[in-house]
Amino acid sequence: MKEMLQIESLLLKRNVEDLRDLALNPDEYYISIQDNREDAKNLLKSLKKFRDEKDLFYVDGVIFIKIGWKVIIPYGFWDEISSLWPYLINLIEDYQNAGKAECSFPNQPITIEMSKLDSRFLLFSVDDNKLKIEEQYFISILLNAAEDYFTFLYEAIGELDSFEMNRINKLKAQIV
């Protein structure tokens, strides 16, 4: 049986002062756009009142990735989530072209890497966390999560990043 891959976009709803508390109580710090879509929309709408329009796109959050019990991107690896998703899309594009790709988080010295292992598997690494996984399965789930994030942004604040959605659709079409 294939272990369940979980990719979840979470928005940071309050400042983090204690990483241990964050790890133990993530629901106190994050709102999941998948599990609490209305609350997440309301958070973005409230932020819109206090920020310049061009700054709204930059919202802190985490792309939490876990397979089985193994966490690949933990709660403590938050960054500008609306920048991190395009970075991951770039990573997939580069990987599709070269069989290997690397980038860093937008505002943290955390490295993300993808490299082809064989005809079926890739190695996905974030900092020291590594995951060997079936290539098509992983890329498909990652692209679906990216699409969900950009759809959420449109639903919440009416901003559709058609450039990113076009890139996602193009990459989905390449999955055999």
Image (cartoon, rainbow, N blue to C red):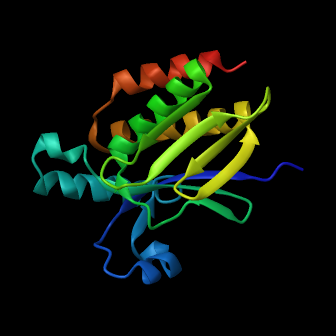
Q: Quadrant of residue 160?
A: top left
Q: Residue at x 39, y 72 (%)?
A: 29
**Left of 1 or right of it: where is 94?**
left
Q: Nearer the viewer, residue 132 or 39?
A: 132
Total marks shown come to 0
Residue at point 25%, 47% (across, down)? 58
Which quadrant of the figure has residue 174?
top right
Residue 79 image point, x, y percent: 35, 55
The spot of residue 126 in percent (x, y) is 54, 52
Residue in front for this viewpoint, 65 or 162: 65
Write the residue at 48% across / 66% down. 75
Quarter that holds the C terminus: top right
The image shows residue 122, relative to residue 25, as above or below, that is above
Tell which of 71 and 41 is nearer to you. 71
Q: Is residue 66 above or below residue 139?
A: below
Please give left or right for residue 42 compared with residue 110 in the image.
left
Of 43 and 165, nearer the camera is: 165
Q: Residue at x 56, y 18 (%)?
A: 97
State left or right for residue 93 relative to residue 161: right
Indicate the position of residue 82 as horizontal and vertical percent values: 34, 43
Q: Is residue 18 left or right of residue 142?
A: left
Residue 155 in the image, given as x and y percentages of width and height: 37, 40
